[in-house]
Amino acid sequence: MYELVSIGKWVEMEYAGRTERGFVLNESYRGVRVAFPNLKRSFFVQKERLRDIEETQLTLEDFDLMIDLALDTKDQVWFQELAYARKALLNQLNK
């Protein structure tokens, strides 16, 4: 099971009968917000439903590229989520 939430960490979960992969944007009282590129959306998920799938974590540069993509596609919600997640990762790196 997924214990520690790390911004940018890739995870997977069962959704609508399929295994979907996404990356962690943030954590709050509602659960863990995960962006699912294949679904083109993000939503809150209970930690217990998530499985860690790899040791790779998104870098600040990865977030910058995705922010550019969100701006290009005029996806304001995704842009805001990515900007928040980038700031959280920057705070983690500066600790």
Image (cartoon, helix red, strand yellow):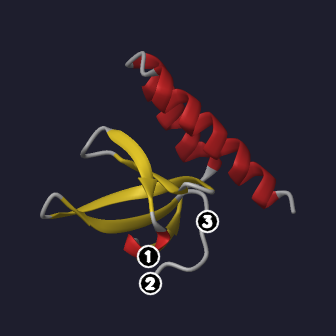
Q: What SS does tag 2 mark?
A: loop
Question: What residue lies at 16% left-to-right and 57% top-to-bottom?
Answer: 16
Q: Which residue is mark 1?
A: 48
Q: Nearer the viewer, mark 1 or mark 3?
A: 1
Q: Is the N terminus in the top left, top right, bottom left or bottom right quadrant? A: bottom left
Q: Is residue 13 above or below residue 88?
A: below
Instruction: State which tag comes first along the sequence, 2 or 3.
Output: 2
Residue type, mark 2 in image = Met
Q: Nearer the viewer, residue 77 or 62?
A: 77
Q: Is residue 54 above or below residue 84?
A: below
Q: Nearer the viewer, mark 1 or mark 2?
A: 1
Few, some or many residues within 10 Å of mark 3 (<14, 14–19, 20+): some
Q: Is the C terminus in the top left, top right, bottom left or bottom right quadrant? A: bottom right
Question: In the shown orientation, is residue 17 left or right of residue 35?
Answer: left
Percent position of residue 75, x then y: 42, 22
Question: In the shown orientation, is residue 6 left or right of residue 45?
Answer: right
Q: Which mark is residue 1?
A: 2
Instruction: State which tag comes first along the sequence, 1 or 2.
Output: 2
Question: What residue lies at 45% left-to-right and 65% top-to-bottom?
Answer: 46
Q: What SS does tag 3 mark?
A: loop
Residue type, mark 3 in image = Ser
Residue type, mark 1 in image = Glu
Q: Which mark is residue 6?
A: 3
Contact? badges 2 and 3 (CB < 8 Å): no
Percent position of residue 13, x then y: 31, 67
Contact? badges 1 and 2 (CB < 8 Å): yes
Percent position of residue 4, x then y: 61, 75
Few, some or many residues within 10 Å of mark 2 (<14, 14–19, 20+): few
Few, some or many residues within 10 Å of mark 1 (<14, 14–19, 20+): few
Question: In the shown orientation, is residue 8 left or right of residue 34?
Answer: right
